[in-house]
Amino acid sequence: MSIYATALPLDGVEEPAPILYQGSHVLPADNDARDGVLLLCQIPGHISRDGRDLSDGDRTVWPWLRLSLHGPGGDATVVLDREQVERIHAYLGDWLRSARSAAS
């Protein structure tokens, strides 16, 4: 049984699947083929090293985030610590502020 709970699935079910990578020489487009799954998964706070602890109402999560990518090119899963997620969060905020519209 997994201790991880899926927090964000980009799997083509509720959210669009990722755009397939065509190489570093190709500028992607929103209508390019999509496939694969990107998952962000967290460990709920009620999980303990000894098993489940449902006694307290703590809604925190453990300081690790599992990132999994499954696609035609293969699969990869890593676990990021809180500091790594903070760095990614900061970078993504900067990126969102500077990314132009795909229609441009």
Image (cartoon, grey):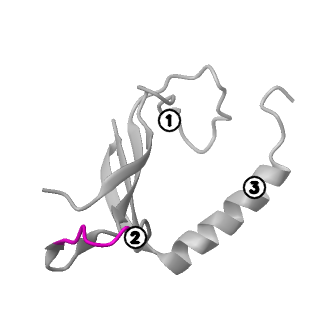
Q: Which residue is drawn at 84% across and 40% down?
A: 100
Q: Which residue is at 41% across, 25% downward?
A: 13
Q: Distance between the residues labelled 2 and 3?
A: 33 Å
The amino acid marked with disc number 2 is Asp
* Residue 59, horizontal then vertical, whole percent: 42, 65
Q: Which mark is residue 95?
A: 3
| Residue visible at 32% across and 54% down in the picture | 5
Sequence-wise, the earlier of marks 2 and 3 is 2
Q: Residue 18 carries which label?
A: 1
Task: Out of 74 and 63, give the one closest to the viewer.
Answer: 63
Q: Which of 40 and 78 is in front in this view?
A: 40
Position above or below: 43 against 24: below
Q: Within 10 Å of the Cα at label 2, are there few (<14), some (14-19), or many (20+) other Cα atoms?
A: few
Magenta-colored stretch includes residue 89: no
The first of marks 1 and 2 along the sequence is 1
Label 1 or label 2, whichever lies nearer to me, is 2
Q: Mark 2 = which residue?
A: 58
